[in-house]
Image (spheres, rainbow, N blue to C red):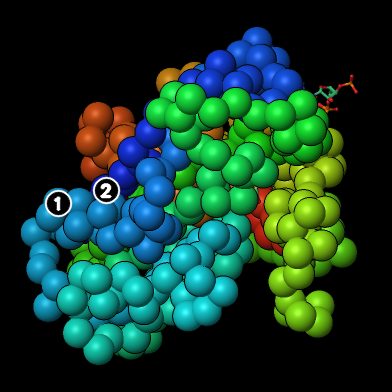
Amino acid sequence: MGTIVRGSGFVVGEHTVKNEQLARVMDTSDDWIRERSGIEQRYYVKDGTTTSDLGVRAARLAMEQAGVGAGDIDYVVFATMTPDYQFPGCGVLLQSKLGLGNIPTLDIRQQCTGFIYGLQVADALLRAGAAKRLLLVGAEVHSGYMPWKDHGIVFGTSDATVTDEERAFNTKYRDRTVLFGDAGGAVVLERTDEDRGLLAVKLHSDGSYAEKLYVPSGFAWRPYVTEAMVREGRHIPEMDGRQVFRMAVTKMPEIVHEILAANGLSIDDVSLLIAHQANLRINESVQKTLGLPDSRVYNNIQKYGNTTAATIPIAYDECRRAGRVKPGDLVCFVGLGAGFHWGAALLRE
Ligand code: ACO
């Protein structure tokens, strides 16, 4: 008996944004971005497309592959750090847009570890009988917090240019803004009688690092949004990049060994490692520490940037569609992100 992925799918924002395009609004370069992060391009949504829209599109693809319709889904778990609204969450928006009926919808916010946390929640709901067939979605529209005013300059659809003052403001945030992209991924999960599926999920958190990667505005302020806050850029994530990097390269290999040992397995048993896509250099380091050959690791950050809760379902969907996962394979998911939260999951195909 196990929880299995019946279908998967993903979508990206409508605009491709190459590294060079970002140099139109801030001081950065293709060379710097590639060298430090491995990223070559990312996608941004067109105006009006939201996180729940990307979630809906990805969910449709996952449902199509699973061969199920709206009436077959009885629970939604939606992971995002960039919801359409402060509240309600994206889960209920997706439920309405997909016409899923009055089923329960749950929003979780564990950022880059959102999908792995979501797997544990989904598995528990399915085991408990609270759900029979569940949609787990991870989607993000990061372009909403980019500091520039006119996305048309980046897309090449506007003749406007940035002033020196705007360029200087945008450049203040270049270490983080170059990393992120917009996308959504989804899986349809259900229980099977077969001897396969999700073997284990291991999760950790350490809130003492909360302010190493966070958005310094919210309901702690009165009122919670002021013009001054926007001027000061407090709607844009603050990030201690080096700290995140250090934690990621340490905690990800650690938790992979932890979950394998707890299940009587070793790194030699892992057919494919799919790590959260935050920075190719982080993942290269994790791979090296774990001693895995290229053939047993999958990365796609070059094409999409960091899409937070969407990275793992996107990478997994690409691997499934490309035949990189075969019956009997052991897939290991691992991630670390804002919180800090980190986690790993083992899936027997
Ligand atoms: N373009 C050009 N130059 C830049 C850019 C840029 N986009 N960003 C920073 N620089 C410059 C800096 O100003 C600095 O210049 P200086 O030496 O003249 O002062 C120099 O490059 C080095 O900057 P650092 O920030 O020290 O560069 P670092 O090597 O640490 O790389 C990076 C920065 C890529 C952000 C790295 O620290 C990293 O990837 N950290 C992890 C970040 C991450 O994964 N975040 C997401 C977590 S997921 C989540 O939960 C949302």
Q: Residue at horizontal 36%, vertical 53%?
A: 49
Quick check: 89 above or below 42? below
Quick check: 257 above or below 32? below
In-image side of 337 versus 142 (left or right): right
- Crowding around mark 2 (Cα neighbors within 10 Å: few <14, some 14 to 19, many 20+) is many
Label disc, if present, on residue 9 of the rendered structure:
2
Quick check: 204 above or below 132? above
Is residue 177 in view?
yes
Q: Please, what is the three-letter code of the amino acid marked with disc 1?
A: Gln
Q: Nearer the viewer, residue 212 or 27?
A: 27
Q: Residue at horizontal 12%, vertical 78%?
A: 71
Q: Quadrant of residue 105?
A: bottom left
Q: Please, what is the three-letter code of the amino acid marked with disc 2?
A: Gly
Q: Residue at horizontal 31%, vertical 44%?
A: 11
Q: Earlier in the sequence, mark 1 or mark 2?
A: 2
Q: Residue at horizontal 41%, vertical 28%?
A: 157
Percent coordinates x, y for residue 300 in the rendering: 45, 29
Q: Secondary structure at mark 2?
A: strand
* Number of residue marks: 2
The residue most toward the top is: 31
Percent coordinates x, y for residue 20 in the rendering: 56, 16
Percent coordinates x, y for residue 100 in the rendering: 20, 78
Q: Secondary structure at mark 1?
A: helix
Pick the quarter of the image with the N terminus.
Answer: bottom left
Q: From the Cβ of disc 2, is ligand 1 less than 8 Å away?
A: no
Q: From the Cβ of disc 1, is ligand 1 less than 8 Å away?
A: no
Whole-angstrom CA distance, mark 1 to mark 2, is 8 Å
User: Pointer 1: what residue?
Assistant: 65
Q: Mark 1 and 2 residues: CB-CB less than 8 Å, in contact?
A: yes
Percent coordinates x, y for residue 108 in the rendering: 53, 71
Quick check: 294 above or below 240? above
